[in-house]
Image: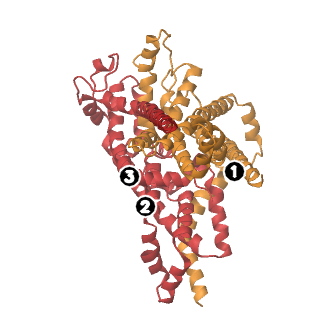
Amino acid sequence: MSAVQSTQSSKNRRMRRIIVDRGIDLVLLVFSLLMLLPLVFLVSNGFKTPQEMLAWPPTIIPANPTIDNFAAVLQDTPLLRWIFNSILFAVLSTLAILATSSIAGYILAKFRYRSLNVIFALVLATAIVPFEVYMIPLYFQAQSLGILNSIWGLLLGYLVMSFGIFLIRQNVIHSIPDELLEAARIDGAGELWIFFRIVLPLLRGALGALGVLAFFQAWTAFAWPMIVATNREAYTIEVGLALFQTGFTVDLGRLSAASALVLIPSISLFVILRRNFVQGVASTGLKE
Amino acid sequence: MLRRKRWLFAILAILPTLAIFAWLRMYPIFETLRLSLHKWDILSRNKPFIGLANFQELMTDRLFHEALLNTSIIAFGVLIITIPTAMVLAALIHYRTRSRLSGFYETAIFLPHVVSLVPAAMAWKWIFDARLGPLNAVLTFFGIEPQAWLFDPTLSVISVIVLCSWQALGYAVLIYLVGFKSLPVSLYEAAKLDGASGPQSFWFLSIPMLKPITLYVSVVTLVSGFNVYAQAFVLASDAQGAPGRQVRVLVLDMLENSFRNYRVGYAASEAVVLLLIVLVLTLIQFSLLRERGRA
């Protein structure tokens, strides 16, 4: 009797649990789709004719898709040039940040000298100063070097990343034991050899995460490219699009097409590199 | 001898990075502080020292007040929307970790955070558009008057807040997920044995235990809120089409003073105000964390 009752109640509990789980799934699914909806519409609007743009309710899959918007945008603006500028800028910035962060992070983690502690304190102290605070003097530095309107001017603001140095330092401390380095030294290995052959390979995961973070940081940069690039040929994609939309505010079809052209590669890249990215961003929240 | 050689290697290896750092970070930061005490319009050769006069002028500058107010409203608005939503979403996703869809939830919510700002803002420009936008169409369907979202002074601030929250949410959810994963499972099992329901253990266990994370995410969200620029630039063009004028934010006001009005010293004093805001927020975070550590 009581045995039957208890299986009955555990059955009920299991049923309730399944209902709750499905309910939560439903909430999350609806929310996720709502988050994606603006982007989905943006891409679909790019393929719509002006008439269909006005249709209500808005269609997700265009009835008669057209590539007129894309053709018009590619003709009106040097969009491909802007995309090229953005990619070059992001790649070079990523390489610079990886190089500076890995060397500085390793040195600051494994070499204990008082002078280095001072340097690390300075890195930490400047880390909280937002870029916007010092970009005006930086602009005049770029100007006096004569590199406004060039990739080098864009790069000037994105060669080092305090957080990158910090991240690599943490990683070296946690994943590379002193004994390993000492053993290599006793075997007669030089410091450079140790860095390139032992330290860098062990940091592959952390560097991957940092690389993705650095790439997207430069790819989405706005204020700095905005003031450095004033020449149409030198715009990054963000600046180009932002100024293009002020030109003619009416044609949302063309704006959507241009935006879609930019979004599709960056979304694909993100989906491929999701693991690295999530790891990188998640580590920004970790405190000692 | 060997020690000396190692020291030399360390210094030589770090020197290039240090040089870049000093030249492109510390020097411009120092310059910002210095220029804020000087009067400098790009054209003139001399930059007289004028003490705190720039800051005194800021106190009576109507445009600066407007920018500061808008920026603060945006920063706190995004905070108020983002933190509770992110916490609940992260709790639900964490609860459904084993579900096959959990990867999709994470990606979908995080995606707006990584896509380029301007194209994403373009999507919202369409949504908020007074004539073509689906938002007004939905409102009309429910019998509510259509609104000029991007031209009304209050509604345009709300529009910027919505866009910024949509972008900030993914980051907050991700950090909270890391937090949830680090909470001890045994505690939740004990609570369950004592008959606590899911929502109860969320309220009485998760929220208090995640306080340091909430503090961190709040400060990051506020700081990036105070640096808002691109979103207002794209969404809030004024009636003449001048970008960003409808919702004036600090960074825009600063850049206009520097590059349109050629008042670099004055713009630098605005940058110093921005820096002070960020410093105060960071100090609050640290002191609250320390207080917790002592308690």
User: In the rendered view of the protein, which quadrant contains the N terminus of chain B?
Assistant: bottom right
| Image vertical order of residue A250 relative to residue A70, above or below | above
Image quarter for residue A50? top left
Which numbered mark, 1 or 2, is in the foreground of this view? 2
Question: Residue A162, position in %: x, y?
Answer: 57, 58
Tell me if mark 1 has few (under 14), some (14-19) or many (20+) residues whose alpha carbon lies within 10 angstroms of its own: some
Mark 1 lies on residue: B33
Q: Cα distance, mark 2 to mark 3?
A: 17 Å
The numbered disc on residue A281 is none
Mark 1 vs mark 3: tell me if same chain. Answer: no
Subunit ID for the residue under disc 2: A
Amino acid residing under circle 2: Leu
Q: Which chain is red?
A: A
The answer to which of B205 and B191 lies nearer the viewer is: B191
Q: Between tags 2 and 3, which lies in front?
A: 3
- Left or right? Give the position of A44 relative to A242: left
Q: Which residue is mark 2?
A: A95
Chain identity for the colour orange used in the image: B
Residue A148 seen in this snapshot = no
Which residue is drawn at the image coordinates 57% and 36% (left, top)? B82
